[in-house]
Amino acid sequence: MTSSFLNGLKLGVLGLTVALSLGSSGLAKEQLNFVVIFTDDQGYGDMSCNGHPTIHTPHLDRMAHQGQKWTQFYSSAPVCTPSRAALMTGRLPVRSGMASSKRVVLFPDSAGGLPQSEITVAEVLKDAGYKTAMVGKWHMGHLPKHLPITQGFDSYYGIPYSNDMDRDPSVKGNWVTTGKTSPWSVYRVPLLRNAEEIERPVNQSTITRRYTQEAVKFIKNNKENSFFLYLAHSMPHIPLYRSKKFEGKSLNGIYGDVISEIDWSVGQVLNTLHKQKLDKKTIVLFTSDNGPWEVFKTHGGSAGLLRGAKGGTREGGMREPAIFWGPGNVKPGVVQEMGSTLDVLPTFASLAGVKSPDDRAIDGYDLSDVLLNRSKSPRKEIFYFGGAQLSAVRSGNYKAQFREENGINPKPLAKPELYHLGEDPSEKYDLADKHPDIVERLAKLGEKLQASVKAVPDQLVPRIGK
């Protein structure tokens, strides 16, 4: 069965669902636009509005002041590929084969990617009449059949995988051993427009600026249309690059410079929406794919007071900076409810007046009432996966940790740990001996969730030519 046939089939099913829903409720005369700004490896503490003392983020601070800053918002995995798959589909990445116990993410030699049978938020919105664009890092398959233009996006401009991949093997010495960034030409990362390679290696020192220009152009070109823009920055993933304008901008060194440029980019997007008179009919989400890569010290970020970092299922690996902005729509304030990138698809679908796919398990919840009215979140649980294995479960304020990450294979702890994240967000004080009943309850929640996951082909293992 060809990918084009599958695309047509899944969009046709969605179209029927939308048509039926419109018959009973109808769409608003003017649909909301949606923008997701997704950074790479940015820590929970890497914004001044989250307390960082030497990183200055005035545009994100303004966004937080005018919108909702979420303090308990989670990515769906502690590394790139599975986290992005969950954002796009509203499904835990183990359900699509985009999380693995054998390989941590997709690489340039990978043959797999997000299956055509998956339905993305871009497809849901495109089928409802939206113009859709993806700008930035994709990392859900770089072969033509897996690129964004096969997954609901009308256009794509960006890099297909991480900015540290396809390194020239003849060049010795790099940021891993020296703490200094190699010239961007060392990394033979391609820049694509749709499916065409237009630059290789991509000049990474200008990449944030160019992503921003593409995003602004898309917004201006579609001011008369309903649109969905997914802007996924390559930074602050190691190796770090920023344009000359931002060199020495931050007291926090090159990492702070990079965040300053991302903050500038956020300002460009928000200002464009305002100038085009689109701000009052657009909702913007800013968040990150996983926690900071702290092993690289000052070239990595900060999880603030949270324990752990990228690659792990402690809070610092998966609790993310998160801001929803939408003047006149998003009710401002600090939200201490739980949310997840899994919730993006059902939330945007609801706000657009269409239904989420109902022929498969959707792990996300509709947060629209929280955004519009500051109501309680329907999300009461978080499941923390390390690779394809469940490592921890949160329900309410309690989190039980059953495994600890060691590479891609989490190892069982000698005994489960239990933390009250309301009183102890840093996970310092183990309460398991005091509340064995809560540990048992959370373990059963995890078992129930795992029982709902059907075996599917592992997309991260297959390699080109093998």
Image: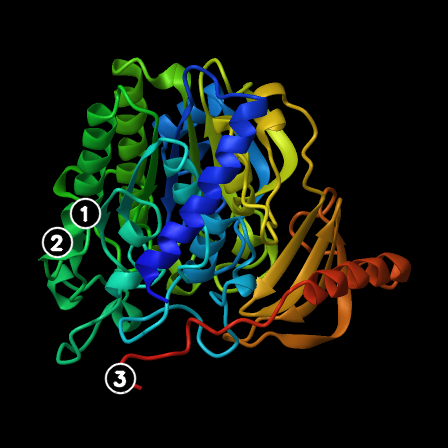
Q: Are marks 2 and 3 in contact (CB under 8 Å)?
A: no
Percent position of residue 129, x then y = 36, 31
Query: Label 2 is placed on what type of residue?
Result: Asn
Side of 381 relative to 106 (left or right): right
Mark on residue 130? none
To which quarter of the image does residue 217 belong? top left
SS at circle 1: helix
Q: Secondary structure at mark 3?
A: loop
N-term mark: 2 or 3 = 2
Q: Residue 203's mark?
A: 2
Colour setup of the view: rainbow
Q: Nearer the viewer, mark 2 or mark 3?
A: 3
- In the picture, the quarter occupied by the N terminus is bottom left
Q: Amino acid at mark 1?
A: Ile
In the rendered structure, are the residues bearing label 1 and label 2 in contact, judged by CB atoms less than 8 Å apart?
A: yes
Residue 106 horizontal/vertical position (percent):
36, 68
Q: CA distance from mark 2 to mark 3?
A: 29 Å
- Residue under label 3: 465
Residue at image coords 25%, 27%: 219
At which x and y percent is residue 317?
53, 56
| Residue designated by label 1 | 207
Q: Is residue 16 visible?
A: yes
Q: Nearer the viewer, residue 458 or 5?
A: 5
The amino acid type, in three-letter code, at marker 3 is Gly
